[in-house]
Image: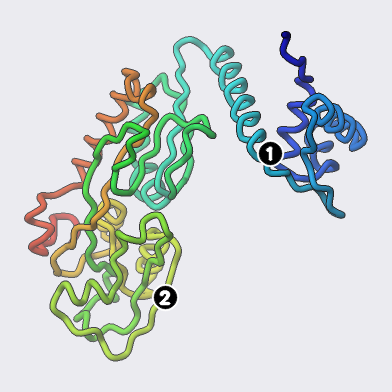
């Protein structure tokens, strides 16, 4: 029995519709008429023998079956785009897509990219900011520099570095921490909530009493708290690897308290087949070497010593 001959044009139109959930908007993307989009969707529904949409006044909703189909169809077109892109690139250029924790990407990785390009001149690098671990089955991403427990069994996990927190502030703002009243707080997401260090937990870990007058200013990213601290808006709990650049240039200074190691760590997560590629092994080694450059001795951090250049 021969397999049904599905229309590739209809499948491509369906892929676009699943992303915008509106026939008129899909028509604009595809540069065709809305009636042509409607015709293609009716054709696909006829070929599949099922309904794909719930019609609404201002668009459409996918049926449960259509949602499952959309995942596979969109993945297929991503693979096609990737294959065409790889075929049209020069043989000497390799494309690498990395997802990175947003604050680490902004404050730690981007300042090191000149060294990366020197080490890998034939790599075309695309960076994507992502907190939650990406679904490698749905997106054409080679690796994710991720902050977590690193215990996912379905992907390859390479440990990069532990993370530590300690209080930091602008040079003209710091003083006795019990005398300060404005504290900048990072409100973590579900993904890394178990690893978040609140000010309450930090004061308890230091054997200190919380100041009676507290003014919290909350942000959704660690880097946002550091930026606010840079402008003298309060004291932040600096994550060591993310704060190291601002400490190094004197924009922020570290208060002399011992650092606390977070339960989660940085890992490079990769599909198992991708992890075996020599290029990814080289990139993994480069990332680990860069973490080592911003990782003073654990004993020094936990004693609360101020590293040279971070005073």
Q: Which residue position holds label 1? A: 65
Rendered position, 97 above or below 128: above
Q: Is residue 138 left or right of residue 199?
A: right
Q: Residue 270 in the image: x percent, y percent?
A: 37, 31
Q: Quadrant of the C terminus?
A: bottom left
Q: Residue 249 in the image: x percent, y percent?
A: 27, 55
Q: Is residue 199 left or right of residue 138?
A: left
User: In the displayed image of the protein, which residue is found farthest to the right?
Assistant: 35
- Labelled disc at residue 165: none
Q: Is residue 296 left or right of residue 161?
A: left
Assess whether mark 1 and mark 2 are in contact (beta carbons under 8 angstroms). Answer: no
Q: Residue at x 24, y 68 (%)?
A: 167
Out of 130 and 5, give the one closest to the viewer.
5
Q: Within the image, what quadrant is residue 275 found in?
A: top left
Q: Residue 269 in the image: x percent, y percent?
A: 35, 36
Q: Specify few, some or many for label 2: CA neighbours under 10 Å numbering under 14, 14-19, or 20 or more.
A: some
Out of 221 and 63, give the one closest to the viewer.
63
Rendered position, 247 above or below 219: above
Out of 50 and 257, give the one closest to the viewer.
50
- Labelled disc at residue 217: 2
Q: Earlier in the sequence, mark 2 or mark 1?
A: 1
Is label 1 in a helix, a strand or a loop? Answer: helix
Q: Quadrant of the N terminus?
A: top right
Q: Within the image, what quadrant is residue 292 found in?
A: top left
- Report the Cα–Cα distance between label 2 and label 1: 44 Å
């Amino acid at each position: 029995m021969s397999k049904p001959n599905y229309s590739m044009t209809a499948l491509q139109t369906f892929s676009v519709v699943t992303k915008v959930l509106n026939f008129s908007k899909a028509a604009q993307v595809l540069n065709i008429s809305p009636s042509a989009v409607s015709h293609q969707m009716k054709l696909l529904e006829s070929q599949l023998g099922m309904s794909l949409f719930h019609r609404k006044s201002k668009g459409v909703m996918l049926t449960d079956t259509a949602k499952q189909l959309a995942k596979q169809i969109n993945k297929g077109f991503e693979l096609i785009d990737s294959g065409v892109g790889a075929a049209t690139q020069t043989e000497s250029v390799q494309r690498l897509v990395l997802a990175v924790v947003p604050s680490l990407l902004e404050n730690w990785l981007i300042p090191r990219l000149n060294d990366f390009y020197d080490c890998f001149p034939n790599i075309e690098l695309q960076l994507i900011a992502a907190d939650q671990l990406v679904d490698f089955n749905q997106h054409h991403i080679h690796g994710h520099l991720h902050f977590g427990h690193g215990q996912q069994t379905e992907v390859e996990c390479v440990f990069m570095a532990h993370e530590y927190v300690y209080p930091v502030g602008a040079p003209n703002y710091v003083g006795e921490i019990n005398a300060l009243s404005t504290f900048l707080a990072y409100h973590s997401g579900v993904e890394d909530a178990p690893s978040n260090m609140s000010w309450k937990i930090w004061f308890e870990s230091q054997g200190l009493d919380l100041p009676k007058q507290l003014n919290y200013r909350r942000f959704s990213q660690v880097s946002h708290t550091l930026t606010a601290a840079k402008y003298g808006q309060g004291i932040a709990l600096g994550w060591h690897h993310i704060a190291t650049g601002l400490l190094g240039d004197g924009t922020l200074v570290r208060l002399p308290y011992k650092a606390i190691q977070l339960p989660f760590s940085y890992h490079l997560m990769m599909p198992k087949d991708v992890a075996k590629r020599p290029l990814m092994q080289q990139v993994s080694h480069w990332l680990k070497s860069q973490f080592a450059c911003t990782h003073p001795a654990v004993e020094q951090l936990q004693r609360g010593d101020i590293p040279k250049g971070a005073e």
